[in-house]
Amino acid sequence: MGRSVAIVGTGQTVHRSRRDDVSMMELVREAATSALADAEMRASDIDAVILANMELFEGRALPEMWCAMGAGALYKHTLKIATGGTSGTSGAIAGFHHVASGLFDTAMVIGFEKQSDGQTTAGMALTDPMWDRHVASAAIGNFAVSISQYLAARDVDERHSAMVAVKARRNACNNPCAHLQMPDLTVEDVLASPYLAYPIHRLEMCPTTDGACAVIFACEGKAEKLCSRPAWVRAAVTRHDLPYLGDLKDRLLTMRTLRDAARKAYEIVGIREPIKELDVAEIYEPVTYAELAWYECLGFCKEGDAWRLIEDGLTQMDGVLPVNPSGGVLSTNPIGASGTIRTAEAALQIHGKGGRRQVPDVNLALVTGYGVYSWSDVMILSSSKG
Amino acid sequence: METKVAVIGVGQTAYSIQDSLHSANEMVLDAVEFALADASMELGDIDAAVTSCIDLWDGRTASNFYLTEVVGSVMKPETRVAGDGSLAVFHGALSLLSGSYRSVLVVSSCRGSEGDHEAISNWVFDPIYQQPLGLDYLSAAALQADYYMNQFGISPSALAHVVAKNRENGARNPRAMLRTPVSLDEIERSEVRSYPLRAMDVAPVGDGACALVMAREEVIDKRTHRPIWIHGMASALGSHYLGDRVLSEDVALRIAAAKSYEMAGVKDPTEEIDLVELSEHYSYQELMWMESLGLCPAGKGADLLLSGATRIQGKIPVNPSGGLLSGCPYVVAGMARVAECVLQLRGEAGGSQVRYVSRALAHGTWGPCGQAHCVIVLGAHR
């Protein structure tokens, strides 16, 4: 097997709906500089740079050619991962592979998206011109259909969904980088917000964000020197699935990619009761209902019991398993970076650098990524090398 | 590298300027089926897929999405490198080395016919200083060609000789888009696309797909597989701004080559590399890349070419497949270079076969004026 690999530094930009003060490259630079400062490293200490971005959303081609300069990538091995919403987590998994391979001792992964430079929904809707484009393509249409199916099958009502939105935007208030910080948000406010497409209210959906996030991976031997509490990558699992809406029955409800990736990751680490054994989870919830659906897929509760977790507060900051102390994707969504942010936030919790969003004594953290209707990534980070 | 990884299956479609007979998925399916049959494997034997395709060139968002079934990544790991196919080979190899997978299917595809290559390539340039100038790959390449030719006193006729050699080679390659040899006169009289580059100096973009099966040594079966081993691989990114570079030099390629040679234990490429498949998106680049790969001193690429050493029968054949000038799709180009090296190392290159090949070099490049490069050294012996 390859070498053990840990995350030794993380850095994020300030995430906002428009970052007119910086170019895309400067956005990358802001995250890279912050991660290097966090790990007390210099750009020359980084052996490889992996970028994660969905270039169609900004109307740029090979943006890494330009933006990688902001990450100090000159003359280094550089590649870009682009897998829709999972770009950020698949980029992180690529960073892990780079270092585990033995070819690179360190690697920096930077997810970035400057959505204000483009039109993301238009970009997302460039799906299959024959079968998909006029049906329910892009994020909102897809979720409107999937959530309707979900609601028909589960005892969840819209108040549970709104509770997820409130949790996310209130947690975000403890995260100085977060985009939507709404300390006074109530369930009633969420349900009073206009429909984007039934049954999704505006405040139940993730925002569009400009932002970037960098994560530094290092090999065993170096990681311990660079970081007093390295976040070791114990499992990194990817599952992709069939593309078309009609291919999968009840896509959101079953999400077999996430179920199988989580099962495999738990098996690798030896986790039997995730809600008890995990200390924190940073999951990719593009819409409130997805968080509820993922609770079941991730084995946090029995099938059909997701609403109990949110109603009983078990996934709140003071609950048995805090989910998304950062505020999650519902609060901050620079797409290519959204998965990298999950990875960084989970590592941050292990590093003990969470500030006001720190969960006490984090040893085991779960990361998920979601993209392109039905793709999933799962990573498990740990304070112990295993 | 303590653990060794090898290419054990190769599949390529016939490349075409416009493939109206196949959808993108069907095109990729062909390449994948060829590669799997070549490796005597089935999709179920493969642990993970690495795809390489770029949304803007495919006109789709997350364009690998529609390849999920044909690359066998239903409920399996897949990642997409949105860049040249050589990088996907690199990433496939290192994900094997990481111990995460034992076998990977690496696939590259492009539907260049469906977009406007030059218009899209304008969007590669930074939007503040360079994009508004109207630079695209072709006009930037013309600047580089002009600078290089002036710097070293290279004549347009040397460029024509690159085209003539590669088109002659391409005529023997059943996968090439352009399978007719052309005379020096025809080349030098073809229309000027962007001075000093003429139509035949410019590689067509086109449609096609390439697939490789790669594996760790423990899954390689000596009875059924003919493994071609990866001896060295490295990539490097150069400066983005054309004004920050000396356009006649290629620092990034020199760095990538040096690292790859070091990993492969190659001290003198002129003696230890038997064959080179490089990515010349424009004719002059073959000369420049040969120099940066250390096959000859700076400025002497034309002399090496005109000596005949880079012909199929020469001492160091370059692009016996016909290269990109004979037509290999954008994005696929770098992976197809690896595929062609594998065929040569196995002695299966048909009419393009070079005698005595035990080590070959595959090269991919992307970005304006060869901003980034990947160099992969392959060998028949472990």
Image (cartoon, rainbow, N blue to C red):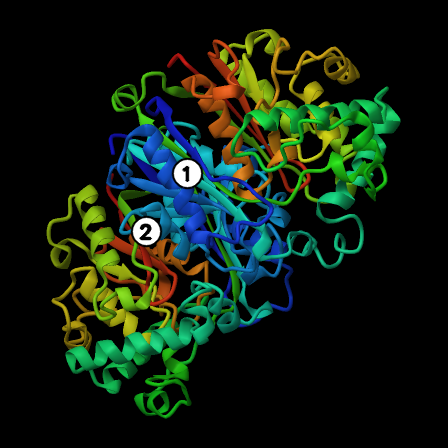
Q: Residue at x 49, y 14 (%)?
A: A364
Determine the residue positioned at 56% across, 24% down: A174
Residue A57 figure quarter: bottom right
In this rendering, which labeled residue sits more in front, label 1 or label 2? 1
Cα–Cα span, label 1 and label 2: 37 Å
Quarter of the image for residue A332 reads: top right
Residue at the location (71% across, 34% down)?
A: A287
Q: Which residue is mark 1?
A: A109
Residue B242 lies, in percent from the top left, at 31, 67
Give the residue type that dot 1 points to: Val
Mark yes or no: residue B210 visible: yes
Q: Which labelled disc corresponds to residue A326?
A: none
Check the residue under mark 2 and report the chain it is in. B
* Residue B99 location (% of width, % of height): 38, 27
The residue that mark 2 highlights is: B346
**Do we see residue B359 in this rendering?**
no
**Quarter that holds the C terminus of chain A:** top left
Image point (32%, 85%), residue name: B196
Relative to residue A98, is residue A53 depicted above or below? below
Q: Amino acid at mark 2?
A: Arg
- SS type, badge 2: helix
| A32 relative to B17, above or below | above
Number of other residues with Cα within 10 Å of mark 2, as a class: few under 14, some 14 to 19, many 20 or more: some
Toward which corner of the image does residue B297 lie, by quadrant?
A: bottom left
Q: Chain of mark 1?
A: A
